[in-house]
Image (tube, rainbow, N blue to C red):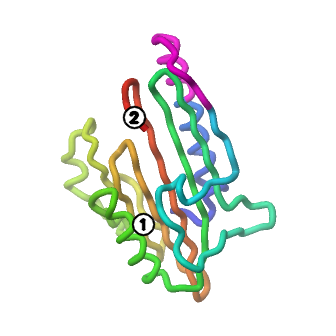
């Protein structure tokens, strides 16, 4: 997970989000509309990502105009998408932050350690339609750690990077549901 979420990952997330808008529009047109909505906000809270903020943390800004969080969502016709991101920093070590979030992520199921860049044969053997979460192509930045928990439809991700004598970390929630699915 990159320190530069807004510069690197945001354009990819935006393209994915806009693609999902098109898909949802097509599905909504084919079904009776059951309500629709759109959320685009530069503010996300701990409840949006489903994880508590590490004690003593503060929002992380690389520049004065840098956003420390984002909350995007779109739903309609029984389909939808939600992305929430928080960028934080603390004076505690990456190891302490990792221990805290491995415990916090466990409430969503097994915690995957995607920190190592290696091919995982068990990932490639899984059925693509499976709801089981895998690391897939996700890996940590050099010197960092990346943990995931949940399902393919409801992913909770924590990226951790050393920052001077402290730690920079990102909390991410990605949820997608199809027709008849639940948030």
What is the secondary structure assignment of the residue under circle 2? Answer: loop
- Which residue is more in the foreground, 122 or 150? 150
With respect to residue 102, does 30 lie above or below?
above
The residues colored magenta run 21-37
Image location of residue 80, percent across then percent down: 49, 32
- Disc 1, SS: strand
At horizontal 49% and vertical 21% (from top left) the residue drawn is 77
Tag 2 residue: 182
Marks 2 and 1: in contact by CB < 8 Å? no
* Residue at position x 35%, y 69% in the image: 116
What's the CA distance linking mark 1 and mark 2?
26 Å
Looking at the image, residue 159 lies above or below residue 172:
below
Seen at 52% across and 42% down, the residue is: 82
> Within the image, what quadrant is residue 13 found in?
top right
- Residue in view at x 21 percent, y 45 percent: 126
Name the residue beneath numbered marker 1: 146
């Amino acid at each position: 997970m990159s320190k530069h979420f807004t510069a690197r990952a945001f354009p990819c997330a935006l393209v994915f989000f806009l693609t999902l808008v098109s898909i949802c529009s097509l599905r909504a047109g084919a079904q009776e509309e059951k309500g629709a909505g759109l959320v685009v906000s530069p503010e996300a809270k701990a409840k949006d990502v489903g994880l508590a903020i590490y004690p003593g943390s503060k929002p992380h800004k690389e520049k004065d105009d840098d956003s420390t969080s984002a909350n995007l969502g779109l739903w309609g016709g029984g389909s939808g998408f939600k992305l929430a991101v928080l960028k934080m920093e603390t004076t505690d070590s990456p190891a302490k932050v990792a221990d805290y979030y491995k415990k916090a992520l466990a409430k969503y199921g097994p915690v995957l350690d995607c920190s190592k860049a290696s091919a995982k044969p068990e990932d490639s053997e899984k059925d693509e339609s499976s709801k089981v979460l895998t690391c897939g192509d996700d890996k940590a930045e050099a010197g960092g750690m990346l943990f995931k928990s949940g399902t393919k439809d409801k992913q909770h991700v924590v990226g951790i990077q050393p920052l001077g004598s402290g730690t920079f970390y990102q909390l991410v929630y990605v949820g997608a549901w199809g027709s008849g699915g639940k948030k």
